[in-house]
Image (cartoon, helix red, strand yellow):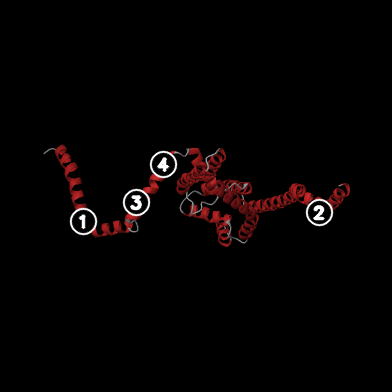
Amino acid sequence: MTPTVWFIIATIVLPLAYFSWTLITADRKGMIAVQTNLGQGLSATGNIEYRRFSTLLVLSKRFTPGSYESKLDRWLSLAGRPEAIPLERLIVGKPVLALAGALLGLLLFTGDPNAKNLAIGLFITVFMYFVPDLLIVNKGIKRQVAMELELPNTLDQMLISVEAGLGFEAAMSRAGQYGDGPLAQEIVRTLQDIQVGRPRQEAYEALAARSSVQDLKSFVRAVIQADKYGIGIASVLRAQAKQARVKRRQRAEEKALKLPVKVLFPLLLFIFPVLFIVLLGPAAINIIEAFS
């Protein structure tokens, strides 16, 4: 036979032989054990609940604009991505809450059908839909404020560690280990990204993207430039720590200067009228009695 015929036979026989050998020598018990372990915990009830959740998720995503979903994901990132409120659960929960508010408004309207109850029902529906947004935004704002207050102390701690002879990543690890705030958590997450193989610059940029604190973004840009051009990290940390302390003092002074203006309106609306009533009330009563 010619070499071409042998080649055709080999292309047919060899794959079939390899496939047969794989079936014969396969560890069926091991495969069954693996499938059992993978399916463990996924009972029939859990499977039904998962399918229901998937159906609700698909329906909710169909009525949720992509830009709004991206905005929700951004708010969750600023809030630290709470484990109890992932993005999928948030997308599903918002229409469910709105539906509950609509049912409550419908009950109110059917009890006394008028324009006032209709407006109240619409307000309850819209409010229930946006309640998760308010909670996440509020949590994100508080978290970013805590990071902003924590940044100067963290930079000082990293500077001390670097001047003591540690590397920059070791200093970050120590700051994240001994810190207990959101900034320490973000530092630990950045180090974990680097350890799993993510480029150092991308990990630093992701740290800045997960925050809205401008001082932290400035620090990340300075670190990236120092790493790129070979600048000493100790000098960068010293300058950034000094700048962060100055800005913290300036923010405190700014809040102190704004305090009299903020106190003025409650003083005029609530304190002065009561004071006038207490001081001038008896005199006004005497004058009324004298002329009556």
Instruction: Give residue 25's mark.
Output: 1
How many angstroms separate mark 3 from mark 4 (CA)?
17 Å
Q: Which residue bears the numbered disc 2?
A: 278
First reached walking from the N terminus: tag 1 or tag 3 = 1
How many angstroms separate mark 2 from mark 1 (CA)?
97 Å
**Residue 122 in the image: above or below residue 203:** above
Which structural element holds mark 3?
helix
Q: Which residue bears the numbered disc 4?
A: 59
First reached walking from the N terminus: tag 4 or tag 2 = 4
Which structural element holds mark 4?
helix
- Mark nearer the viewer, 4 or 2: 2
How many angstroms separate mark 1 from mark 3 (CA)?
36 Å
**Residue 76 in the image: above or below residue 181:** above
Task: Please name the amino acid that badge 2 sits on.
Answer: Val
How many angstroms separate mark 3 from mark 2 (CA)?
68 Å
Q: Nearer the viewer, residue 171 or 178?
A: 178
Counting from the top left corner in percent of width and height, residue 35 is at: 29, 56
Task: Please name the amino acid that badge 4 sits on.
Answer: Leu
First reached walking from the N terminus: tag 1 or tag 4 = 1
Q: Are marks 1 and 4 in contact (CB under 8 Å)?
A: no
